[in-house]
Image (spheres, rainbow, N blue to C red):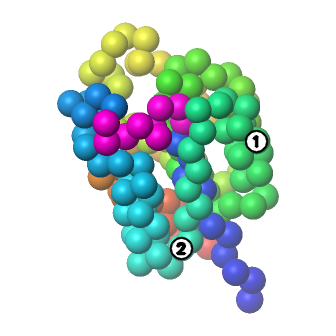
Amino acid sequence: MSKAKPILLLNGPNLNLLGTREPQIYGSTTLAEVEAMCAERAKALGHEIVCRQSNHEGQLVEWIQEAINGFSGIIINPAAYTHTSVAILDALKNVKAPIIEIHISHTHHRETFRHHSYVSTAATATMMGFGVHGYVLAVEAMAQMLKAKK
């Protein structure tokens, strides 16, 4: 029996600053703490998770391309690239596995330019407004999606 492919958790620009960046919007939990929460929840659900963060659009595109064959699903917070990146959208459109787009804040309650998401076009589901707990909810939702696919 082959080992299940891991889930890929991608975080975009400035999310490496979680814990200190605009805590009134993003809270005080660090990215390392978010990743640890996700890894713990994924393990409890029988999955492995690989966490990556980059401030560079091209790096995120390359990781998405890697996920086409190497991962069972993608959870992605593209951050500011949500609203600007056709390149990330085009890469995600090649992924056959489930994709969950996640945002810490409720983007529709923020500036008008944050209301549009290119990523949503390719996402299987979108979660927003749950704070960093949304990441754990996304891991749980991904586990359910993968179970349903079997």
Judged from this view, the residue extending furthest toward the left is 24
Q: Residue at x 76, y 41 (%)?
A: 62
Percent position of residue 73, x then y: 61, 57
Splitting the image into 4 quarters, where does residue 20 fall? Answer: top left
Q: Residue at x 55, y 65 (%)?
A: 49
Q: Which residue in the protein does label 1 denote?
A: 62
User: CA gap, disc 2 to disc 1?
Assistant: 23 Å
Q: Main secondary structure of the magenta part?
A: loop
Residue 59 vertical position relative to residue 145 in the rendered view, above or below: above
Residue 62 vertical position relative to residue 34 in the rendered view, above or below: above
Tell me: 63 left or right of 74: right
- Quadrant housing the N terminus: bottom right
Splitting the image into 4 quarters, where does residue 97 fall? Answer: bottom right
Q: Which residue in the protein does label 2 denote?
A: 47
130 or 150, which is in the foreground? 130
Describe the element under mark 1 as helix, strand or loop.
helix
Percent position of residue 14, x then y: 47, 32
Q: Is residue 14 visible?
A: yes
Percent position of residue 150, x then y: 62, 73
Question: Which span is picked out in magenta?
Answer: 12-20
- Let me know if residue 96 is in the magenta part: no
Residue 92 vertical position relative to residue 33 in the rendered view, above or below: above
Q: Is residue 106 visible?
A: no
Q: Amino acid at mark 1?
A: Glu
